Image (cartoon, rainbow, N blue to C red):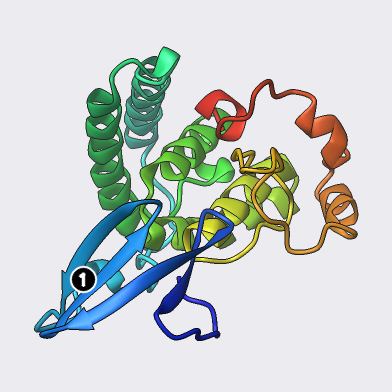
Amino acid sequence: MLRAAYVPGTVYLRMLGQEQAAEFVVKDGLLTLSLGGKSQTYRRLDAVPSELNLEPVALGERKPIPAERVKAIQTDLAQRLLKDQAVRMGRKDGEQMRAADADNTVYLKTLVTELGWIDVERFGQATALAAFLLVQHSGDLRLMKAALPEIEKDVKAKHLDGEQYALIYDRLQLMTGGKQRFGTQVIPTPTGDIAELEDREKVDEWRRELGMGPLAEYLKSFSGGGNVKSETK
């Protein structure tokens, strides 16, 4: 995501909360960016790709579901969560993790466009948490944007912890070029700090409103950085 600033021959990129300056050259209709000693060339597309459509996924109508269907969904999501966690243990096989995430994303997107978000009232807390973790790992911005207000409803109803909302809110902010509010995304930076905060002075106040402890205490649970809580959140 570009910031509103211009220096001749330089463009500013914000990636996962960190701003970096890249040199650029436009020649013969091609754009070449140089960042960190590596260069990449881009051409103008004939049409805007579907990936740049960031409108939230349209969720299905929230309505009663037969008990046997609920049970089947609970079982499916529990099994998918087990696989989600298994492929993340030790992070030995990135390709396997990406394949599992892609499969889970297709499954979840199909499900929620039919039935609405996987809420606690209809599916129970364990299943709602499984859906949260799968969408958190999906990397699908449209699905995450659709899920965020639904997760907020469950948090406000005290069906889920506020941390679930904070985690997906912060990740969405960083993925779309913004700054995190609650400090949940512990991504190493060159200075050893976490990914950029919206307001460091107010972060503990915002965390407290969601029933979360101080940021300093949260950071003590990490050793050597990495992404959110060993990728279980």
- Residue 48 location (% of width, % of height): 19, 80
Q: Is residue 192 above or below residue 147?
A: above
Look at 83% across and 57% down and name the residue there: 200
* Residue nearer the viewer, 2 or 221: 2
Q: Residues within 10 Å of mark 1 (few under 14, many from 20)?
A: few
Q: Residue at x 31, y 58 (%)?
A: 113
Residue 80 image point, x, y percent: 34, 26
Name the quadrant containing residue 90. top left
Q: Nearer the viewer, residue 7 or 207?
A: 7
Q: Tell whether 93 sits left or right of 142.
A: left
In the visual, does 162 lie left or right of 137? right
Looking at the rendered image, the quarter that the N terminus falls into is bottom left
* Residue drawn at (48%, 32%) of the image: 130
Residue 159 seen from this side: no
What residue is shown at x 60% (from left), y 56% (from top)? Answer: 169
Quarter of the image with the C terminus is top right
Q: Secondary structure at mark 1?
A: helix
Tell how many labels: 1
For residue 216, above or below residue 9:
above
Q: Nearer the viewer, residue 72 or 110?
A: 110
Q: Nearer the viewer, residue 3 or 190?
A: 190
Residue 109 spot, x, y in % from top left? 30, 51
For residue 192, which quarter of the picture? top right
Drawn side of residue 14 relative to residue 156, left or right: left
Residue 35 visible at all: yes
Amino acid identity at mark 1: Ser
Compared to residue 28, the image places residue 36 above or below, namely: above
Determine which residue is flagged by label 1.
Answer: 50
